[in-house]
Image (cartoon, rainbow, N blue to C red):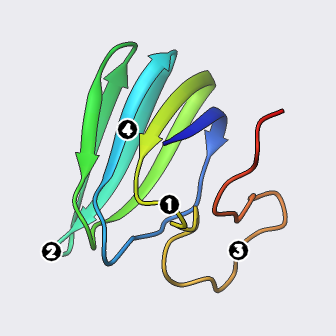
Amino acid sequence: MRVAKFHGAYIWHAHQDTDELFIVVSGRLVIHLREGGAERAVTLEQGDTFVVPRGTEHKPVADSEAHILMVEPTGTLTVGDTHEDVPEYVDATTGHHIG
């Protein structure tokens, strides 16, 4: 389980071997998806959940601060399976210890 404060746009990325469950604790999150050459967006409000299927390219965006829980296997890199052109402001990590 990953806990995140989120504000702004993340980068397009995909996790080839795992689904990713998003749970919005507070705020609003829009997840942009690219599937089969088409793009769509899913808007999540507080209390909403959404699963991004493995291999689906996605880009989370929050216009104001949102608090999110993400459920994915331990060791999953936040920027997906390809790591090219990751901007410096993006925290490419498998997680941080709280404390």
Q: Residues within 10 Å of mark 2 (few under 14, many from 20)?
A: few
Q: SS class of the residue under badge 3? A: loop
Residue mark closest to the camera, 4 vs 1:
1
Q: Which residue is at 20% across, 75% downward?
A: 37
Q: Quadrant of residue 71?
A: top left
Q: Quadrant of residue 95?
A: bottom right
> How many callouts does the rendering have?
4
Image height of 75 relative to 96, above or below: below
Distance from disc 3 to disc 4, alpha carbons, whole Å, reads 22 Å
Q: Disc 4 designates what residue?
A: 22
Q: Amino acid at mark 3?
A: Val
Q: SS class of the residue under badge 2? A: loop
Q: Amino acid at mark 4?
A: Phe
Q: Which residue is at 42% across, 24% downward?
A: 24
Q: Disc 2 designates what residue?
A: 36
Q: Earlier in the sequence, mark 3 or mark 4?
A: 4
Residue 11 image point, x, y percent? 57, 61
Q: Quadrant of the C terminus?
A: top right
Q: Disc 1 designates what residue?
A: 74
The residue closer to the viewer here, 36 or 53, is 53
Q: Are marks 4 and 1 in contact (CB under 8 Å)?
A: no
Q: Are marks 1 and 3 in contact (CB under 8 Å)?
A: no
Distance from disc 2 to disc 3, alpha carbons, whole Å, reads 24 Å
Residue 86 - label: 3
Q: Residues within 10 Å of mark 3 (few under 14, many from 20)?
A: few
Image height of 15 relative to 40, above or below: below
Residue 4 image point, x, y percent? 62, 35
Residue mark closest to the camera, 2 vs 4:
4
Distance from disc 1 to disc 3, alpha carbons, whole Å, reads 21 Å
